Image (spheres, helix red, strand yellow):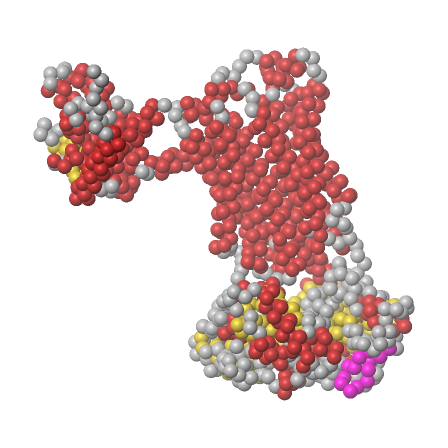
Amino acid sequence: MSAWRKLFRSEDSKQDLDEEIASHLAMAAADRRSRGVDADRANAEVMHEFGNVALVKDVTREAWGWAWIERLQQDFRYALRQIRRSPGFATAVIGTLALGIAATAAMFTVVDHVLLQPLPFKSSSRMVHIELAGFAADSYSGAPYLDIAAWREQMQSLESIAFFGLGINGRSFLQHDNSAMQVEFTRVSANLFPTLGVSPQLGAGLPDRPEEFARTADTNDVVLSDAAWRTVFGADRNILGKTVHINDEPYTVVGIMPRGFFFPDRPESPQAWAPITLGALDRGRTFDTPNYEVIGKLRPGVNMAAALAELKTVQARVSQGYVDPEWRKRSAQVTMKKYSDTLVGVDKRRALMALTSASGLLWLIACVNATNLLLARASARAREMAVRGALGASCRRLVQQLIVEGVILSGLAALIGAGLAIAAVALFHHTLQRQLSISVPAVPNVTVIIALAALTIVSAILSSAWPALLAARSPIEPALRQGGLQGGVSRAQHRTRGGLVIAEIAMSLALLAACGLLLRTIYALRHVPLGFRTDHIIVANLEIPTYRVAKTNATTSIYEPLLERVQHLPGIDAAGLVTEVPLGQTFTMKLALDRKDETSGGKSNPITVSFKAVSPTLQRVFAFPILRGRYFTEHDTAAADPVVVVNRAFANAFSPDEQDPGKIIGKRLLMMVKDGKQATVVGVLEDFHQSSVGTPSQPEIEASIPQITPDSGFYTVLEGIAMDLAVRTRRKPSEVIPELRAALKQASPELAGSNFSTMDQIVEDSYGSQMLAARLLETFAGSALLLCVAGLYGLLAYVVSQRTREMGVRFALGAARSDVVWLVMRQAGTLVISGVAIGLALAYLAGKLVRSYLYGVSPHDGWTLAAVALVLIAAGAVAAYLPALRAADIDPVEALRAE
Amino acid sequence: MAKEVYQNRVELLQGTLDLLILETLRWGSQHDYGISQAIRVRSGERLQVETGSLYPALHRLERQKWVKSQWSLTGQNQRAKFYELTKTGREQLARDRSRWETMVGAIAGVLGPIPEPES
């Protein structure tokens, strides 16, 4: 029989071997009988000659080569039996490991989704993002076409360069039948998709004529994303060549991109792409020249530093083409970043890394705890191991069996942990969505499952290999001796377990410290005066159909009627419109305002300011404190002089030498309309927080909506992209919101789908990442503390049970109960104090990691560290209490009785 | 302890035991008891194969596909498992024999002629 068949019919093979040996014995006996030996003696001699039948069978079966599988099966079954026999122990280990694995798996799911998932283009690691860094401080600055063309010709390190529309130029709506769906509409160069290495799943896509480099691409072609195709057109295969309308303009569909493709960023709505038309404005480098975002593909084998160096040299030449000497200098500054890095900000990445380390720490603590439990168990089973060894089990066999037990325990823990992780992710779904703008899928993907399996195996190895080795290597004789149970754990093992508990305590301290720091941050944030009222305000975030706004005067056709209607609803105290409510984090327009500095000899030194459009009624909703001057009134119409209101931060930035911010009133700032009058400052507001509670107030200019007419250059951006409706009302939101929605729908049908929220909720959400981190750390730190207490308790209880005899002797010799209690507490104390000492060092490091989250508290805050240390010492005292009591209750007579 | 001894003995004879078994089977199929008897007889009672080595060796040879086995009846109406050489077994036997002879020749060359006893 071949070996494989033997494997599957192992019983048959064994029987076969038995028969073979039996026939051998029979034949040998027959032989002897034929020589005249009598039957009984023949049998005896034959048996003697044969040797140890069982051993021969064993060795032969070894030779078959798959005895190890059988042994594994045996170990497996035995392990299950052991687990069933001591359910308490098994639950403790499984629970501990499940906690650690759940935390790490949940964090990994998030990290995988945000950081590790590859971009949907080929060789995404070679994609770089190039920008001119010298112009605006913190916002994107693309490059004009002439620069891009120059780079294309002169750069050797880049295989190809493509470009696409800069920033948001308004909301776009894809119109079909009678509905309009918001899409992310990006204009791209014709060679973008080939540069990315992606072709449409349907159709030819944008025509790529490399020799012309996007010069004459047909304007009216469009490529849709898979999501757009499916949602709007129901995956109609005849879509190619059909005309669709985007923003009221007709486009011909020439391609559908594959599912899962996105560009430039992860989509919140379906995407569509159309080619850029280069026009007369692209021929120069003036103020009106459109800027594009540039993405390039490095040649294989070229590293980014070399490419950047080449780019800088090339740009030094190219920047000579700028007319304005100031621009010439600024345009020479270029930066290059990996494209994948631009999608996830450095802060976010650091935050995720910090949280992952925290969860990793929790997992380590869980493993340490499990190891401790398994060590205790192993020493309890020392006798069993000794008997096995005496019966002939090899060291390897013992270790194998204990590791199988460990693997089963951690396998079960992993299953439970996975379930907990999924639950946790679902729980944090809303916060994650808001903070990291990701929607984590409920079912983990393959990467996560593989990571989970790896975690399990590593946990098993960490927790059980070591106790297994210790148990297998321990000498047999002492364990078998009578009284071996109290024979004492070896000094080394005791020190090891103590060391493990100290490590646990140290790591828990670090987690608790980080948690404490974050809680203090939240407290500090909550008590920052915001600079405006937040109570009883309902906010609607409107999605403005930009194309419609461009054709009419939105002020008269949409906004003023809307305000009228809303103000006349019952129970509304005040209503106002603003491009973005403070802390809204939806949309801000940033402007680089030149100010001719008298002191620096007329050189322009731009400051970045936020620019918002507001309705005069807004003041009644938010009650911004006015420092000087006035707010907008109904008299500030399109016919009157253009006026603006600024905040204190702006006044300080504009005239840094001026002490009195009020002096800015009366200054003329900017032109609202080309060739029109310059707007005058009429009021200065106190500072208030715009982007987040933790960031100081930024310079801001506000203009009145009625004064922003369609001929203003700012019209499209300020009124045509986003607008928030803020309503002050004492009524309940659930009652008011449907009425507001009806009013919105009347103003313009697309507005009916807007999101509603309250100002309090928006403020809550703006704490965002700190809140998320704080909540997560609370969970981690709390679990770590529990595990610590359990670990310490386990160790002390074990020690006391081991030393009952010794305690009995002490009592007999006259020790008081309190002395014995003190003995136990002292032992606990040494462990806790050493743990806390090491933990403080770890906490120092932990503080450094979460530094970017903190607000209003230093990463090495003494109060927090002291408080946390006290918490741990108290926890240690609690853990030691019961074992100490038990030690005190030992009856000396019982303890000293012979065993 | 006992198991250690067995392993040692299997180690010593492993190569040559296979050779002996294959050679014994050259003359026809034989059952395991017969094989051990044949080796004992033909070596002039000098080589006594332990069953603890024989069985593993036989099963190992079968796994290598150099012998194949079949249950059959002996002359005395005893049911026994008969082993016989396969074609590859024959080739292996030839290889083993030549290797053995090479080794014997080499050792003999080193040892030189048998020294004359001192008289």
Magenta region, mostly helix, strand or loop? Answer: strand
Task: Determine if the magenta segment contains residue A681.
Answer: yes
Note whether residue A810 is visible. Answer: yes
Residue A424 spot, x, y in % from top left: 58, 50
Q: Is residue A880 above or below residue A604?
A: above
Residue A173 spot, x, y in % from top left: 59, 77
Task: Determine if the magenta segment contains residue A575.
Answer: no
Q: How many marks?
A: 0
* A706 lies left or right of A835: right
Q: Quarter of the image holding residue A792?
A: top right
Residue A495 spot, x, y in % from top left: 60, 29
Residue at x 45% of width, y 72% of height: A201
Residue at x 62% of width, y 31% of height: A498
Q: Quarter of the image holding residue A154?
A: bottom right
Q: Quarter of the image holding residue A428?
A: bottom right
What range of the chain is rendered magenta?
A: A667-684
Residue A305 spot, x, y in % from top left: 60, 64
User: Residue pushed farthest left?
Assistant: B75
Residue at x 41% of width, y 36% of height: A76
Residue at x 58% of width, y 71% of height: A295
User: Residue pushed farthest front?
Assistant: B119
* B41 lies left or right of A343: left
Give whichever of A853, B48 is nearer the camera. B48
Note whether residue A183 is visible. Answer: no
